[in-house]
Image: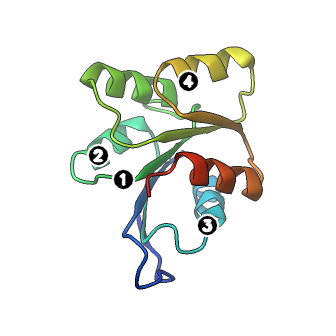
Amino acid sequence: MWGRRSNRHNDAPLRTVLIVNDSALNRKLVSQALPKGYADTVVHAKNGAEALEILRTVAPHLILLDLNMPIMDGYQLLEALQQAGTMPAPIIVLSADVQPKARERVLSMGAVTFLGKPPSTEALREAIAMYGRP
C-alpha cells in the first residue's frame, strides 16, 4: 500500500500521491511514470473503498484514479467525495473507457482531467504539471 521515493531534492516540497487502481501492474507503471522527484510518498489503493479509508489519515497532493474497479469504482469514489463536499486533492482520472460520456461525467463530478489508459508518460507528466498541487 505504501511506497517511498528517495530521489527528492533538499529544497523540493514533500508530496504524497494516491494511486487508486485494482491492477498491481498499472499501479506500478503509473508510479514509475511520475516525474522524478515529484512525490516523496506514493500510496496505493486497490479500489475506491480502500482509497476512502486512506483519505481519513493521508492528505495527498494528487490522486490518480482508475474508473473500473471492484468493490467501489472510480465513479462511486468521486460521488462519495462530492457528497462529503470536499475534494481532498486534484483528481486525474486514468481510464480505458474513453467514451466522451465517461469523460464528461468524471469532469462534472470533480475530476480535473481525464486521460485514456494507458496514458503516455509525457501526457501524464503534463497533466501533473498542470493540475498537481505544488
Element type where label 3 sits in the image: loop
User: Which mark is in front, 2 or 4?
Assistant: 4
Which residue is label 3 attached to?
Answer: 35
Which callout, 2 or 4, points at the residue further toward the start of the chain? 2
Residue type of the residue flagged with mark 1: Pro
Evaluate if marks 2 and 1 touch, with contact meaning CB atoms under 8 Å apart.
yes
Identify the mark at residue 60; answer none if there is no mark: 1
The x and y percentages for residue 48 are 41, 36
| Alpha carbons under labels 1 and 3: distance apart | 16 Å
Give me the residue at 66% from left, 63% from top. 33
Marker count (numbered): 4
Which residue is label 4 attached to?
Answer: 107
Which callout, 2 or 3, points at the residue further toward the start of the chain? 3
Identify the mark at residue 55; answer none if there is no mark: 2
The C terminus lies in quadrant: bottom left
| Alpha carbons under labels 2 and 3: distance apart | 23 Å
The x and y percentages for residue 111 are 51, 31
Which callout, 1 or 3, points at the residue further toward the start of the chain? 3
| Alpha carbons under labels 3 and 4: distance apart | 24 Å
